[in-house]
Image (cartoon, rainbow, N blue to C red):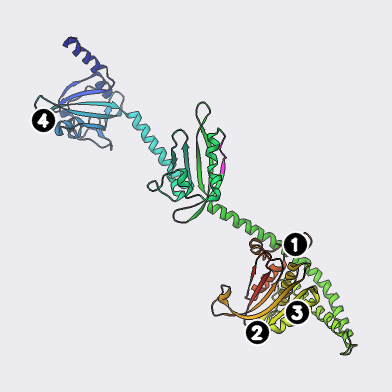
Amino acid sequence: MSSTIAIRHIETLYNTLNQGIVFIDRDGKVISTNLAASALLGRPFLDLNEIPPDDPEICALGDDERLLPVEQYPAMVAIRTGAKVQNFVMGIFNPKLRERRWFSVDACPIYEAGGAEPRASYSIFTDITEQRQADRELRQSKLHLALAQSIASIGSAAVDFRTGKWDWSDETFRIYGVTRENFTPSPEGLGNLVHPADWDNLYSNVPRARQGKSPETVAEYRITRPDGAERILRRIATAVKDETGNITGIVATVQDVTELRVAQRENKALQSQLYHAQRLDSVGTIASGIAHDLNNTLASLVATSGLLLQSMDDRDPNRLRAELIKEAGLNASELVAQVLAFARREALVQEPIDVAQFLDQSLKLVRASVAKRIEIHEDLAPTAKVNGNAGQLRQVVFNLFFNAAQAIGDRPGRIDLSTSEADGAEFGGETGKRYVRISVADTGCGMSDEIRGRIFEPFFTTKGAGRGTGLGLSVVQGIVESHGGRIGVESEEGQGARFDVFLPLA
């Protein structure tokens, strides 16, 4: 091929390229341009030394959209430094399109044979206006998405089955309490954060999707962040499919619902308390009506037993039975008075009580009510007095004994009653503050941890339908706390139970 033909081919290639090419000498004078250069610029190419320094329609802008001095143009930098300039972004106004177009420019110095300094340079530039706008919109979209996720506290996550790549948004990293620098999303990484009991709930989606099955849409699981905080997360997932319908990955949203779940539990507890309060209010109304009728019957019982005692001498074998009948009637009258006070929400009178003497008297009625197969042993050590309402405290004793007797059931057993003085520190109270401890222990069936945690709840009972209301121990706790005291229980299944009532000294 002759040199003429070769040059002609080069010129053809030079002028048919879509990229602009410009040759410039050391003085900024344009030596040569191809056809694409003028077409991309919308004007004949000006000599650089003719470009005014402050005309935005002539002078180029840099990537920061500020006026670019001529000496910083890639062609002049390449001549001045003798080094290549690559991917330099600059904006030039196109008068035909009446808009600024953006270009990526590469400039290369040209040396003469044996020359130490460049004598010229050539620049190749490509229009990147649409690409630049798309990149800017993409960055803006990502920024808006990140802001929206931050405001809503909802992150996004994705896994691509084809590449195995996991992708988390910034909000997802924040929700998990980790950063991009110290955590790489992966099944192994998640395994260190997710509660072991919830692994199956979280990981079941990936094998399902790999088998072509749609993932479970909603799942909740617990995590422990690196700082030790425990959180509850809610994930909503969906499958990603290719054009043939095959599942190629999963995308999901992740939301921290810890506070929401806590609020829901608190709301449920408040609703339950309201329901119990309404039931108790109804019980109080009914009890008030029944108490009035019982009062009339008990008044007759006490009066009749009193007259009967007057007709007996001390040697009469039935005198003890009559005394027990009268004392039971008087105690029942006190209980009726409590019921009426409860229904009217009136405070009951408290007075100093000798605990050992009070319990000794109460045991007379208890022994008459508890089955003979159950032995009752007492160790009533003398203690200081407590302030209390005798009728209410007697109700505490009766409930604890009847509860113990029911725990023993139909077999022989034993109930121990004891008293002592104790320090508040023994039950987590104020150290140095003194209390009287009344203990009721039985050899019954005992309780599991779950039941022991609920025995003081209103209406909670382990008895069958029609055999209990579940109010006994709840009432006991209420009475003890109204006296400024505390009640505790120790029990194991099959090992019986012991209730300790702590009442502050008078």
- Residue range corresponding to the magenta coloring: 213-218
Residue 356: x and y, percent? 69, 83
Q: Nearer the viewer, residue 361 or 344?
A: 361
Closer to the chain start, of discs 2 and 1, is 2
Q: Secondary structure at mark 3?
A: helix
Report, in whole angstroms, how far the alpha carbon at label 1 lies from the one at label 3: 25 Å
Report, in whole angstroms, how far the alpha carbon at label 4 lies from the one at label 2: 110 Å
Q: Secondary structure at mark 4?
A: loop
Q: Nearer the viewer, residue 496 or 161?
A: 496
Hey, what amino acid is under mark 4?
Answer: Glu
Q: Which residue is mark 1?
A: 463
Residue 221: x and y, percent? 54, 48
For discs 2 and 1, the disc positioned in front in the rendered view: 1
CB atoms at circles 4 and 2 under 8 Å apart? no
Q: Secondary structure at mark 2?
A: loop
User: What label sits on residue 385 in the rendered view?
Assistant: 2
Report, in whole angstroms, how far the alpha carbon at label 3 lies from the one at label 2: 18 Å
Hey, what amino acid is under mark 2?
Answer: Lys
The structure residue drawn at horizontal position 61% and vertical position 56%, both measured from the top left corner, is: 267
Hey, what amino acid is under mark 1?
Answer: Lys
Instruction: Mark 3: give few (<14), some (14-19) or many (20+) Cα within 10 Å.
Output: some
Is 120 situated left or right of 290 in this image?
Answer: left
Residue 333 seen in the current view: no
Q: Which residue is mark 3?
A: 363
Which of the image's four quarters has the C terminus? bottom right
Is 313 situated left or right of 353 in this image?
Answer: right
Q: Main secondary structure of the magenta part?
A: loop
Closer to the chain start, of discs 4 and 2, is 4
The structure residue drawn at horizontal position 60% and vertical position 57%, both measured from the top left corner, is: 266
Report, in whole angstroms, how far the alpha carbon at label 2 lies from the one at label 1: 36 Å
